[in-house]
Image (cartoon, helix red, strand yellow):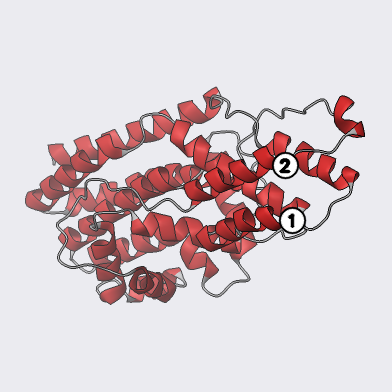
Amino acid sequence: MRRWPLTLVLVLLGASACREADLTAVRADLVTQAAMVCAAPPVRPAHAPKTRELQPAEVSAAIATLCTEEAARQAASAPPLAVLHEALAQDRAITGDLRRSRLLIDAPRIDLGAVKGAPEGMRTAEEALANASAGSRCGPAWTGLERFMLAAATAQAKAGHAAEALEVCADVVALARDEAVTGGMTELLLSNTNLQRAYTACTPIVDAAPKEAAAKLAASLAVLRPTFPSTLEDVLRRDHAEVLLFTFGRVREAARPLPCERAIAIAAASDHLPPLTRGERLELLRAWNEANAEVSPPDEKYTEAYSLTLRVLDKLTEHAKSR
C-alpha cells in the first residue's frame, strides 16, 4: 500500500469495549486530512518564463500522447513537449499535482516494503507503480513520464538539436522538483530515481551542446535546486493523509482511489454513517488510530538517499557550468 512506515499506535480498547465508541475525533480528522489531499498545488519559482495560462486538461492530454518511449522519440519536437514545458513554467506545480492524483487512481496500493533507499530500491518502487498502472490507458506515460521525456531529449541531441534537448533536461528536473513538493513518499522515490536518470542522460548532451546552451541549463538548475524540500516532513504529512483516508475507506467498504473528489466524499460520508454495531465502531476506531499515528521522523536511509540524489543534481549543475 502507498504508505510511509508509520509507527502503529494501538489504543487500548479493553475498557471502552463495554461502552459506545465516540467517532467525533474520526470525523474531524477526516475533514482535516481531506483538506490536505485537496490543497492547491504550491506556488514555487519556475525555471522558465510562462507565456500563457494552461488548464490541467491540456497537460493530461499532452502526457497521454507520450504513451511509449517510441512515441516520445517521434514527438521530440512536437506539441506534447512544448505543453509540458509550459506546464512546468506555470506559477503552481500543476503537473506534479496531476500526476499524484493519477497515480492514486492507477495504483492506490503498492508495496514499498522492498525499497531500501538505494537506487536499486527506487527502481523497485518504480516497477511496482508501473505494474499496478499497466492496465490503464496510457498508464506507463504517467509512471514513466521523465523517462519518456529523456528519450525525446536524446533523440533531439542525436538530430543535432542539443540546445533544445537541454531544455527538456531542465524540464525533467523541474518535474522531479514538483513531484517532491506535491507528493508523498512514492512520488519522492520516483523523483530521486528520475534525477539520477537525468544526470546519466543529460551529461553527454551537455558535452555536445554549445556553451550558451550549457550555461542556460546551469542557470535553470540553479533556480530549481533551492526549491527542493529541505526536509521530508511535508512529504510524510501528505503520505499520512492518504494513508488515513484510504484506511477509512477500506473500513467503510469503499476502498477506492483518493484524488481530491474521493477524499471529500469520504469525509462527507463520515457525517452520515449508517448504524454501526459496537464491534464495527471499535474496529473503525482501531483502524483510525493505526493510520493516524503521529508522523515519525523519516528513516535515515531515505534521508540519506535523498541527500545523495541532490548531490547528483549539484554535480550536473557544476558540469553544465564548467562546459
x and y, in percent, of residue 57 in the image: 38, 73
Q: Above or below — where is 42 with respect to 309?
A: below
Q: Say which residue appears at 51% left-offset and 62% top-offset.
A: 102
Nearest to N terminus: mark 2 or mark 1? 2
Q: Amino acid at mark 2?
A: Leu
In the foreground, 156 or 300:
300
Screen quadrant of the C terminus: top left
Residue behind mark 1: 273
The residue tagged with tag 2: helix, strand or loop?
loop
Residue behind mark 2: 23
User: What is the number of the mark on residue 31?
Assistant: none
x and y, in percent, of residue 69 in the image: 43, 68
Q: Above or below — where is 151 with respect to 19?
A: below
Label 1: how many Cα within 10 Å (few below 14, some 14–19, many 20+) = few
In the foreground, 52 or 120:
52
Q: Is residue 51 left or right of residue 3?
A: left
x and y, in percent, of residue 29 in the image: 60, 41
Q: Say which residue appears at 49% left-offset and 49% top-offset.
A: 35
CB under 8 Å between discs 2 and 1: yes
Q: Is residue 264 left or right of residue 211?
A: right
Q: Mark 2 to mark 1: distance in Å?
A: 10 Å
Q: Can residue 147 be seen?
A: no
Q: Say which residue appears at 21% left-offset and 57% top-offset.
A: 167
Q: Name, please, the residue furthest toward the left.
A: 212
Q: Where, by quadrant of the figure, is residue 63 drawn?
A: bottom left
Q: Where, by quadrant of the figure, is residue 25 drawn?
A: top right
In the foreground, 5 or 129:
5
Label 2: how many Cα within 10 Å (few below 14, some 14–19, many 20+) = some
Q: Is residue 197 left or right of residue 323?
A: right
The residue tagged with tag 1: helix, strand or loop?
loop
Q: Amino acid at mark 1?
A: Leu
